[in-house]
Image: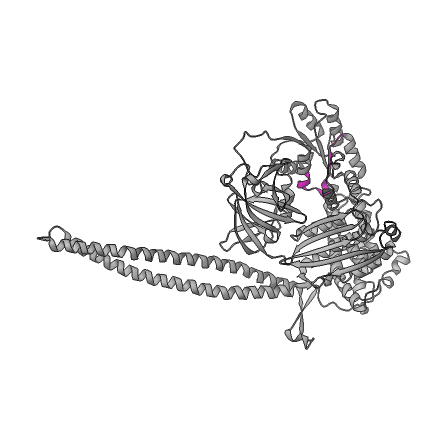
Amino acid sequence: MQPSPGLLKKLTAMFLVEAREHVQALGSGLLELSPSADREAMLPIVEKLFRGAHSLKGAARTINAGEIERLCQKLEAGFSDLKSGQCLLSAPALEELHRSVALLSQRVDTLEAGLPIADCGMRNAESGSKPPSATRNPPSAAPPSAIPERQSAVPQFTIRNPQSAIRNEESVRIAITKLDAIFVQAEEMLAVKLVQAERASELRTLASLVAVRDRLWSESLPWVNALRQQVAVNSTSSADGKDGTVGLLDLTTRLLTLLEQDREHTAAISATVAGLARSLASDRRRFDTLADRLLEDVKKTLMLPCSNILAGFPKMVHDLARDAGKEIQFHLHGTEIEIDKRILEQIKDPLVHLVRNSIDHGIEPPAERVRRRKTPLGSVSVTITQAGGKVEIQIADDGAGIDVAAVKAAAVQAGVIAAGDVARLPDQDARQLVFRSGLTTRREVTTVSGRGLGMAIVQEHVMKLGGTVGIESVPGAGTTVRITLPLTLATLRGTVVRVANREFVIPTANVARVLRITRASVRRVENRDSICLDGMSCALVRLAEVLGLAAGPSAGDLSPELTVLLLDHGQANLAFTVDQVLSEQEVLAKPLGPLLPRVRNLSGATVFGSGRIVPILSVPDLCLTAGGCTQSAVPGPAVAPVRPKRLLVADDSITTRTLLQNILESAGYEVQTAPDGAAAFNTLQSDQFDLVVSDVEMPRMDGFALAKRIRTEPKLAALPVVLVTAREAKEDRERGLDAGANAYLVKSGFDQTSLLETVRRLL
């Protein structure tokens, strides 16, 4: 199946925008590498370059740019060898990588010039000459006269005039960067809208206070008037008037006059304030309408149909199926649904990975399908549906399904989970392991898959967009991946809750239910609180504990009922107790800034009309963190504190040592450190610890030797040991486990959550 010329032109234009970004990122990343630099420090950069080459390779395949795809495959293999330590970053190797990126840039420029890649820039390779050295702007291999002048360095977007249905020429070309700037300013009007709402509330409060004052004066006037009359009577009955009643009568008369005048002024103030409140309310309604319309119209200019990124998928599936010798029928549904272009741009690569996985891992060869009593023709589908402010993308196939046993075996081999724990892992939890970086069931690396990277990229991209991803699979029947995303990025409906006297915003799209339950309905199951909802058991966790805000019971714990939010995270539903649900409102989500690129359990923040900065919670992070929370959601009487577990951290890097110490102490552990393995072993001889976390490469005694020494000591033989190292080769993992380590964590994919989960499991 070949795309039409018009479609191919459109796909190529989209690819060129993406390719330029990837090539620029590759070139910039290579400039950060140095043969003399510490390998551990270079690993994050190599990982980023590896992923960039991997993504560009998939995009090149979409438009059948074989030469670009092969160059990306070569780069990807080189970065993979650097990651695994199979080759060193020498000066010649780095120069070769620069030349490859420069040649890749040439190929992209050639494609942009509209010339066949096979005819341009290949003569050097065929004649045996070396590729040109890397430069910031590599020269094109085509003659200058053959390359059209670029109009702009940024992608362009077209806004049509309402009359364009009749006269198509009535349109303008505007750089997307300018539209983005307008969109940001339009979104800021939401903040003004919230401030106006706050001011209107303050004015209503003032009006009510003035009204109360007016009522109090009105109630006091009859009493003052009665007092005046009584004084007047007493003054008349007095024989000589020398008893002071005449003076008192004069005072009460003056007081009554002042009160009446004050009442008139109060009534005037009340009328003025009420008028201002009405005027502000009217102005606010008009402003809200205009702001909402403007924001909605600007949003529409940046909303694009999903077909913009899915148009090339049929050809990609056709080519992949042909290369794999498989017969596949591809279905697309809901491509007319429009999503924020920023989300579309970032979700394209994950969708490519998932569809390629369905073809390579899921669909069986025709002969195998016939043997399993299936039709030779396999089915892969992408279905997009919209519900409210969310969109769900479902990628499904009718292939072999996920081999849970193979996944568990690969997880053990990769050091993701210990062999003793894998047997107790439920199948559904085992399927989620496919999202772990470096885990693959492929024994060989192909141009399509085999490096264990694609599914990790999927989860990473989706979570950055504030979405969720879940996977379902039936052996022999197929696999379905569901991705849930917001329609837009910046504004969202948020549920405002109070926890431990602090306010937080939870995206309403992730709030399945809000309910009140009795404490008696909470049951303790497998050391976790749970409640029964719609006939199914659901884990119950205190949100304060997840956020680390309260270690013990709070005043709200004395209430006979609990306020519970049931949060929806893909297939997982977790219930969280909060002190109070305050409101639901539209908020403007803001990132935390470059100094806080990643804060656990937070996705951003918003500013309320009162000026208060309120954090926005990340539901995926909350559900992940909740897995380690076992404190009861219904605390009873205070009990004696339990001694915290004592941990020993051994690492020759003071930076890494301090980082690990802070992470573990924040989780409630008591931590002592040692600068190397020998010092750690001496400390173990004189003090008692519950677990050891050690680096591998250390002076005097490395982590392997430390683990062996611990296992040979009778009193330390049962002490859990966790190795945290930059060595990620299979042989190093096996050596660490053979030495007696209970877990082996790689720093290149280090995440504090995985460390804490491992420590909790071993304790």
Q: Quadrant of residue 664?
A: top right
Res. 197 in view: yes
- Looking at the rendering, the stretch of residues picked out in magenta corresponds to 740-755
Nearer to me, 26 or 252 = 252
Q: Position of residue 735 (x, y in %)?
A: 79, 33
At 50% across and 53% down in the image, what residue appears?
A: 611
Res. 31 in view: no
Is 326 positioned to the left or the right of 514 in the image?
A: right
Nearer to me, 736 or 560 = 560
Q: Quadrant of the N terminus?
A: bottom right
Is 641 positioned to the left or the right of 245 in the image?
A: right
Q: Decide: is 189 above or below 563.
A: below
Nearer to me, 381 or 303 = 381
741 falls in the magenta region: yes
In the displayed image of the protein, which residue is found farthest to the bottom? Answer: 166
Is 711 positioned to the left or the right of 513 in the image?
A: right
Q: Position of residue 356 (x, y in %)?
A: 79, 54
Nearer to me, 577 or 438 = 577
Q: Decide: is 533 above or below 338.
A: above
